[in-house]
Amino acid sequence: MAPLLIVVALLVIAAGVALWLSDARERPSTDATDTTVAADFVEPAEPAEPAREAEPVEPEPEPEPEPVEPEPIPEPAPEPEPIPEPVESEAEPEPEPEPIPEPVEPEPEPEPAPAPTPTPKPAPRAHRKSGLQFPGASRRERKAWAEGHGFSFAKHSDELVGEWQRGAAAAGATPKDIASGSIYGHSTHVMDLGGVTVIAMDTGRISDVVVDMRREGFHADSSADLVTVTEAEGFTVLGTHAGAVERFLDVRVRTALSSLPEAVTAAWFESDWVLAEMDRSSAAAEWDATLAPLALLADAARTLPPETADQIEFGFATRDMPEQTLTPEEHAQLRPVTRPEPEEPHVQRPDEPLEMPTRVTGAVRGQVDYSDLGGDEVAPIADGAPEERPTDLTRVRREQAPSSIFDDAPTKDPKKEEE
């Protein structure tokens, strides 16, 4: 049956080609007849009246040569002349395509700005899980991802069994298909836990405070010890200690929550781990996008209260403080402690008082060599020469006379007093 259909198709194609060739051959002949007929009709248009009289004669003889013979040959000669003119005029606009380069296409170059915003990142999710999946495909994908990042891969790990009791591990599921390694300075495990992908990252310090962050629309069984604290970046934040959780929500935590991909449905802090739970359709590209924000959350976990206080260690030896032993009587009643008076040190004085130097009486101590005044090389302090006093010609003379304020009162004349 198939060969017959092929033969029929070839025949149809051959017939189509033949029709196309015949049509192409007929077109030039029809075009020539059309041009001659058009020329014939144009000529009688000039003599309007005689043309009308000849019209009833032309339809009787159908052959075309009759109208061609009576027509003078010189008349059509001038007519074809105008025909090439329009052809030339049509050919003249051909140079017009020259402005084709004029359209300034480089101007829309600034438009490439929207190009560097490739938002269709969730696209890889479609190819990973669409409902049906070959057995072992998830494991092979996890193993290939681990090899690409330098992680080790294991189907099971006894060390991680029972490590977490919240979130996806609340039902007692054991981790499977584990890719373990270190990234951003934190020990990291990417695994299947309870049928979903979970990424766990070590924080480096154990804390008794549990922080549970769930994306809006994600429903999970809530523990009795968790209380709702606040809403942050599309996540509902719950915790065991509201005050500690509020202090924990700083800029780093909010930035990390806003950077988590949509595939992350929940994240929680448990012991010395921070874990991110992802939906079942998560792909390797979304695992990579989750690592950096999760590492930022692991760094911010240092603000949570530690399980035990750190011991203060000194780099040098210190003295041990002796323990004070108290008698039962002293334990029974507390009494104020009297401060003992400080003991004055014993001063031992000499039998004869020491002779201290004085300026009241002159004394010579030791040998002194006498010399003439000015005979040594040391310049004298006062050699009798007047001191040079710089002046700027501004001087106020001071009279050395006594004060005259008491002489202002009028003096009494003794003669007038006697009179």
Image: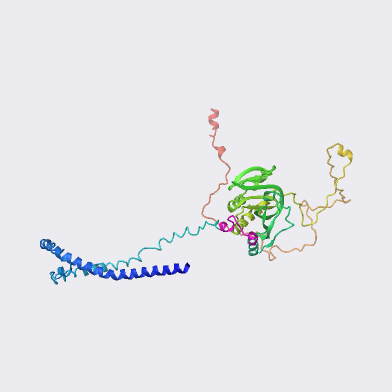
Q: Which residues are magenta?
A: 124-140
Q: Position of residue 233 (x, y in %)?
A: 58, 48
Give 79 or 375, whichever is nearer the viewer.
Answer: 79
- Place of residue 103 in the rendered image (x, y in percent of width and height, measured from the top left): 36, 63
Residue found farthest to the top: 419
Quadrant in which residue 9 is drawn = bottom left
Q: Does the rendering let one see residue 291?
A: yes
At 70% from the left and 47% from the top, the residue drawn is 209
Q: Is residue 131 above or below residue 416?
A: below
**Which quadrant of the figure has residue 200?**
bottom right
Q: Is residue 200 visible?
A: no
Magenta highlight on residue 412: no
Instruction: Confirm whether the magenta stretch covers residue 128.
Output: yes
Q: Is residue 343 left or right of residue 85?
A: right
Looking at this view, is 240 or 124 the one in front?
A: 124
Image side of residue 87 versus residue 128, left or right: left
Coloration of the structure image: rainbow
Quarter-wise, where is residue 406 in the image? top right
Q: Position of residue 333 (x, y in %)?
A: 86, 36
> 408 or 119, which is in the foreground?
119
